[in-house]
Amino acid sequence: MSEHRMRGNLPRQLNPDVLWTGGCLDVYLGAEEKVHSHFSSYVVRGAKKCLLVDTGHPLHGPAMETAIDNFLGDRPIDYIFPTHAEFPHAGLLPKWLEKYPGAKLIGNMSDYDLYYPEFTSRFCHVEPGDAVDLGERQFRFVPAVWRDLPNTLWGFDTKDRILFVSDGFSFLHAHGDHQCAFTTSEQPDPDHRLVRIVNQGALQWLKYLAAERTFDDIDALLHLLRPTIIAPAHGAVIDSPETTLPLIKSGMLA
């Protein structure tokens, strides 16, 4: 990535209670070939509590703040869930913790005290299988099958059956009008190369471990949860899991 500029047409509401926000950054595959990578965050609004999935890239902070304020109105964020401590996923933690003084930082908190010792009293450590009640919906923490750091967690919204998968299910996209806010059913299928490139960059273990050894685990998780939507950080929202999953697997095998 030789140049980073804000692009895209987010925010977008996936439904009345889930906001897709963040933005895209340019990725150069060659001197003349430019594509985009999502850097997405999500807000889940329950009847009682609201939760932010990933903090977003700092370049998108001002636009995210406006989008979240418009979405929530006078309601605060109650839980901030960084899927892991990498910059695009946790880089705006101080911003949101200062804006929402009553918010708890929730997730696998291993090593977060080294980065943010001033906020340790607001940490809430969870493990796969734990859940928080947002009011008329639960947000469950599930194991991250495809992860780039050992303490990565995924999340699942039980009401709308949305699975939040961090760096999993990632793919780049060519930029067209509004394409950064398209779901998979609204655009052509990603080609093999755009899946392969981003997964090789984000999931370093693919260099050493055969990807197909993880496929039984991902299939079992999807069978258990039956998500209708899969929401990655670095790819379009997947509202056609049955057709997109084989494409993701194929790209990971390369």
Image (spheres, helix red, strand yellow):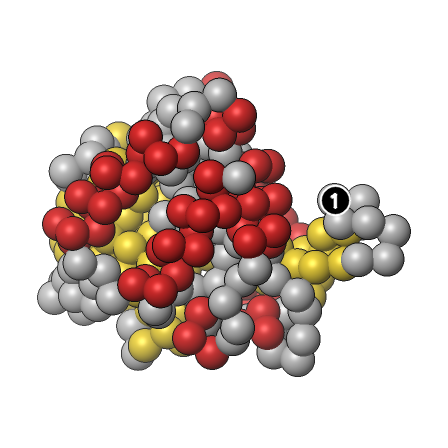
Q: Residue at x 38, y 24 (%)?
A: 150
Q: Residue at x 43, y 24 (%)?
A: 209
Taking the view exactly as shown, the residue that stands out farthest to the right is: 31
Q: Position of residue 71 (x, y in %)?
A: 41, 74
241 to the left or right of 185:
left
| Residue 63, picture quadrant | bottom right
Q: Position of residue 82 (x, y in %)?
A: 41, 42
Residue type highlighted by circle 1: Met
The residue beneath circle 1 is 1
Question: Foreground residue, 238 or 116?
Answer: 238
Q: Residue at x 70, y 59 (%)?
A: 35
53 to the left or right of 222:
right
Q: Is disc 1 placed on a helix, strand or loop?
A: loop
Q: Position of residue 64 (x, y in %)?
A: 54, 63
**Residue 92 shows up from this direction:** no
Q: Is residue 130 above or below residue 57?
A: above
Q: How many marks?
A: 1
Q: Is residue 239 above or below residue 85?
A: below
Q: Is residue 222 above or below residue 104?
A: below
Q: Position of residue 78 (x, y in %)?
A: 30, 53
Q: Residue at x 18, y 43 (%)?
A: 220
Dividing the image into 4 quarters, which one contains the N terminus? top right
For mark 1, does the 10 Å Cα neighbourhood hold few (<14), some (14 to 19), or many (20 or more) residues? few
